[in-house]
Image: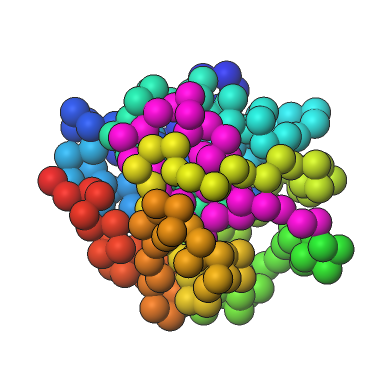
Amino acid sequence: MANDITVQEWGSGDRHAVLIHGLGNSSGSWFDVGPALADRGYHVHAVDLPGHGDSAPLERYSVEALADAVQGAVPGEPALAVGHSLGGLVLAHAVATLKPAHAVYVDPAWRITPDAAVINFFRSQKTWTLDDVAANFPKWDAGSLERKLVALQKWDVTILDDLGSFTPADSSTPVVPSTVVLADPSNLVPPERATELREAGFAVSTVAGAGHVVHIDDLDGFLEAVSAVIAV
């Protein structure tokens, strides 16, 4: 653990990869992606963000604090950095300092609007049972469902109180070569915004039929979407 951040690792290759999960999840969400990248020669570092998984909570949350925590826990200048949802926002704030050779943003929450209904939905997840998780993620296998339930049980839900003050990402231009992988459809990056990102220099693709947690809904589709980036 570094800076009270837990890091799960796979592989021992010469190329480093950093994985950053989304809100209410943990490094366990990369349970299949981590080994797949290790098989391709990466040394993979999947963080538990503060207040998630086995990482210590913060008294007050900000995206800058989350980004600083990640940067202090993983190798600088990795070959690859991947951020999902909230992790995509964290990566966007860390990318200039972290300096990955390539950044992948998976259905990123680059701007968080604290809609009361959405916040209440997330807050309700603290009381979810395994049946609730299965009902909300019907494509997931038993292991993924169980890991999500454990992540929710460990999650510090007070982060929801601070989300409204999270600084949006500046996605006007990619800081490093960058790929955006979207759900189908994406509620966070609508088609017109995806077009703007392409015009700004981002590579953008959609994994057909995948929900918000693209890499768990369709691992093969996710790996295909980033195949050019993660090629051996």
Residue 143 visible in this rendered orientation of the protein: no
Which is nearer the eye, 24 or 208?
Answer: 208
Question: Residue 7 location, x and y as percent?
Answer: 46, 32
Q: How far across and down, in percent of the image, does residue 2 sit?
A: 51, 19
Residue visible at 59% across and 43% down? 170
Reply yes or no: does residue 102 show up in magenta.
Answer: yes
Residue 99, above or below 131: above
Q: Is residue 117 visible?
A: yes
Point out the residue furthest to the left here: 232
Asked which quadrant contains residue 32, the reply is bottom left
**Where residue 63 sits: x, y (%)?**
67, 36
Does residue 18 appear to the left or right of 88 in the view shown?
left
Rendered location of residue 93, percent (x, y): 57, 35
Decide if residue 22 is on the left or right side of residue 129: left
Relative to 207, 172 lies left or right: right
The magenta segment is 86-114
**73 over 224 or under it: above or below:** above
In the image shown, does 80 or 38 lie closer to the viewer? 80
Residue 150 drawn above or below residue 186: above
Residue 34 falls inside the magenta stretch: no
Q: Residue at x 81, y 48 (%)?
A: 164
**Residue at the spot x=80%, y=28% of the render?**
59
At 17% across and 39% down in the image, what residue appears? 41
Front position in the image: 159 or 140 = 159
Q: Colour scheme used in the picture?
A: rainbow
Total numbered labels placed on residues in the image: 0
